[in-house]
Amino acid sequence: MTRPSLDAWLDEARADPSAPQCGMYLFHDGVVRSTPRAKVRGGEQTDRAVQAVDVFCDRERVEAAIESAKALPGIYYVRVWLNEGRIPVGGDIMLVLVGGDIRPRVIDALQLLVGKIKSECVSEEEIFQDQCQ
């Protein structure tokens, strides 16, 4: 999938009717890293490096997550792009843009939305060198 332009997204957000209510826009750009999830989160000691991640998403759940983020107080603009399939290290998994009235609300909304997408809408399987074909 072709990664959308963050500049174009921001231009579109600033042209949206909600723009006068937005005092902040915040992006999340999730990328594939070479360090395994278990090592980063759980401290597992391993020398294995991730080569790619297989990503699958439930688009209906993503839309529901977006709508719930838009319903948060002070949030006026939300846009999400998700990549699917086998994504190499350094490749984009997701882009999320949230616009709202004040910094604490935008930060909280972005954190909630990305967390919900990662935990409820997307499944990821790390692929290591010995698994690559």
Image (spheres, rainbow, N blue to C red):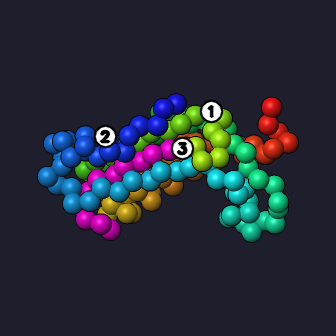
Residue picked out by circle 2:
8
Q: Which mark is residue 85?
A: 1
Q: Quadrant of residue 26?
A: bottom left
Is 42 or 72 nearer to us in this picture? 42
The numbered mark, 3 or 1, whose residue comes first in the sequence reads 1
User: Is residue 62 at least partly visible in the picture?
Assistant: yes
Residue at (26% x, 59% y) in the render: 24
N-terminal of the pair, mark 3 or mark 2, is 2
Which of discs 3 and 1 lies nearer the camera? The answer is 3
Element under disc 2: helix
Real-space Cα distance between discs 2 and 1?
Answer: 24 Å
- Kind of residue indicated by mark 1: Gly
Q: Main secondary structure of the magenta part?
A: strand
Q: Residues in magenta?
A: 93-104
Q: Position of residue 3 (x, y in %)?
A: 46, 37
Q: Is residue 76 magenta?
A: no
Q: Residues within 10 Å of mark 1 (few under 14, many from 20)?
A: some
Residue at which label 3 appears: 92
The residues tagged by marks 3 and 2 sit, at their Cα atoms, a distance apart of 17 Å
Q: Please, what is the three-letter code of the amino acid marked with disc 3?
A: Asp
